[in-house]
Image (cartoon, rainbow, N blue to C red):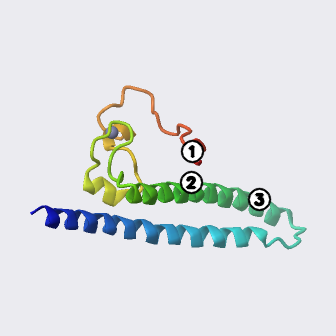
Amino acid sequence: MQTKKKESQSKRLKNFENLLRSRLEELRNHVDQLRREMVVEDEVDDEATQAFRSHNREFVMTTMEREIRNISEIEQALERITKKEYGVCVACEKAIPDNRLQAIPWTRLCVDCAGGGIKRNHDRTLGQPVFGSSLG
Ligand SMILES: [Zn+2]
């Protein structure tokens, strides 16, 4: 029955969509919180406290950057769900297995293309600047 299959497929996508949305909200709240914390800046004379703060600030910045990147990946994943392109590897165009999607719902690469598996002899291709170009 085709209609039934379609139904379960959209149910499956809905499931991932929910996963992505709750993660997105979590991240947005956290980034908001971090932003608010960064603004708090009362005067301190104590050098140790200052050093601690600037170190802490760096850590917060790194966390924020990572989370903002993650937010944008999730947004793109949600977009792919809308376009019905979700769950397909953008590099080799094969279907990404569900267990990988469950672990990383916003992934757009299969295990092979992400470099986490078999091919280790080549340089890692992680961190290629894919962002920016896709924002239009
Ligand atoms: Zn692939």
Q: For the residue labelled by badge 1, is the local secondary structure a helix, a strand or a loop?
A: loop
Q: Nearer the viewer, residue 86 or 1?
A: 1
Residue for point 56% across, 39% down: 129
Q: Quadrant of the N terminus?
A: bottom left
Q: Pointers 1 and 2 in contact (CB under 8 A)?
A: yes
Earlier-in-chain disc, 2 versus 3:
3
Distance CA(mark 2)–CA(mark 3):
22 Å
Looking at the image, do the residues carrying marks 2 and 3 touch, with CB atoms under 8 Å apart?
A: no
Judged by depth in the image, the label closer to the viewer, 2 or 3, is 2
Mark 3 surroundings: few (<14), some (14-19) or many (≥20) residues within 10 A: few
Residue 104 falls in which quadrant of the image?
Answer: bottom left
Q: Position of residue 93 (x, y in %)?
A: 32, 40
Depth check, mark 3 against mark 1: the one in front is: 1
Q: Which residue is mark 3?
A: 54
Would you say residue 31 is visible in this rendering?
Answer: yes
Disc 2 marks a residue whose amino acid type is Arg
Q: Which residue is disc 1 drawn over?
A: 131
